[in-house]
Image (cartoon, rainbow, N blue to C red):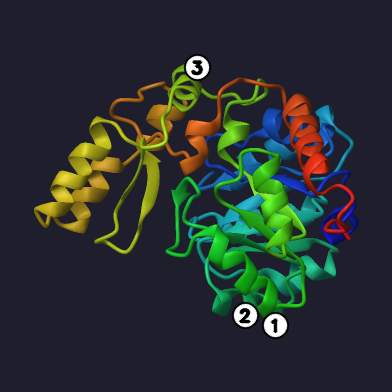
Amino acid sequence: MRTEITELLGIQYPIIQGGMAWVAEHHLAAGVSEAGGLGLIGAASAPADWVRQQIREARKKTEKPFGVNIMLMSPYADEVAKVIVEEGVKVVTTGAGSPEKYMEMWKSAGVKVIPVVASVALARRMERTGADAVVAEGSESGGHIGENTTMVLVPQVADAVQIPVIAAGGIADGRGVAAAFMLGAKGVQIGTHFVVTKEAQVHENYKQRILKAKDIDSCVTGRTTGHPVRALRNQMTKEYLRMEKEGTSFEELELLTLGSLRKAVVEGDTVNGSVMAGQIAGMVKEELSCQELIEKLVKETDALIGGAGFYE
């Protein structure tokens, strides 16, 4: 399963683990990288010292490449961007903004930069600024989302840029991976399925909520505010959608969700917390190790398109 992405990142399989806030820490990142994919540490809104510590802990568990995902809206983004260079991290993915101001520093240090994009326009802009690849993330993804689905976004981005495209959103098994390659992607990024791996240090309640999810359990809050977020339905999303319908102010809606992701991931409150997960949650039926999951994905994909020339 060699593609431009495996060559670019020095990994065995073109499978990247999403940089999910509160979920993507060193145990999971190292587990994915050891299994032949690319693990990511999700910096989210964490201070630079926490990110530095996570990088060092991941290095104790794997000698294989792993990366860091930076949320560019974070108040610590400038410091985290420097930590990437200081700690010799070779891959960075970015979300919630443009990484242009850090590009020169990162490129000088040999860092591969892969922004997450939700539109053709942003993909083209990232290519112009020196990005090595882009993650085209469809609205099926968990967490903050754009409007276009993976099925329509990936081929349009693949046609618009010369750099490799990684597909994200709605990928749970080999069928999804094979479809991504057929749409023009050279790799995939998977989030929700990795939340339910044995290495993921999340509360058991969070894992069980995903494992028990049905196809209709996914919903999107925040469409009226311009900040749509996908999560599994619960009391919090029900309340949020009611308040949205009544025209509640953005500030009040923000108060309702303050700390809600941590509440679900760390404390296990899947009733009032934000159980961020993609629409494929209903397809996730068992807890596997990162090794088992990646081997399963590769085996299923190979059975479908292994000899069809899609990998190169």
Q: Nearer the viewer, residue 259 or 143?
A: 143
Assign a secondary structure to mark 2.
helix
Q: Which mark is residue 125?
A: 2
> Most extreme residue toward the left, as rendered?
246
Image position of 283 with respect to 226: above or below: above
Q: Residue 125 in the image: state x and y as whole percent.
A: 62, 80
Say which amino acid is labelled 3.
Answer: Glu
Q: Kindly check if marks 3 and 2 are in contact, taking CB atoms under 8 A apart as contact.
A: no
Disc 3 to disc 2, how far (Cα)? Answer: 40 Å
Assign a secondary structure to mark 3.
helix
Image position of 234 with respect to 124: above or below: above
Q: For the residue carrying disc 3, how many other residues have a C-alpha within 10 Å: few (<14), some (14-19), or many (20+)?
A: some
Q: Residue at x 84, y 38 (%)?
A: 36
Q: Residue at x 50, y 61 (%)?
A: 96
Q: Residue at x 54, y 66 (%)?
A: 152
Image position of 14 with respect to 123: above or below: above
- Name the N-terminal-most of marks 3 and 2: 2
Say which amino acid is labelled 2.
Answer: Arg
Q: Residue 272 in the image: state x and y as whole percent.
A: 28, 29
Q: Kindly check if marks 1 and 2 are in contact, taking CB atoms under 8 A apart as contact.
A: yes
Q: Residue at x 42, y 36 (%)?
A: 215
The residue singled out by tag 1 in the image is: 128
Assign a secondary structure to mark 1.
helix
Residue 287 seen in this snapshot: yes
Image position of 165 with respect to 296: above or below: below
Left or right placement of residue 36 versus residue 219 in this view = right
The residue singled out by tag 3 in the image is: 204
Q: For the residue carrying disc 2, how many other residues have a C-alpha within 10 Å: few (<14), some (14-19), or many (20+)?
A: some
Left or right placement of residue 277 versus residue 200 in this view = left
Disc 1 to disc 2, how far (Cα)? Answer: 5 Å
Q: Kindly check if marks 3 and 1 are in contact, taking CB atoms under 8 A apart as contact.
A: no
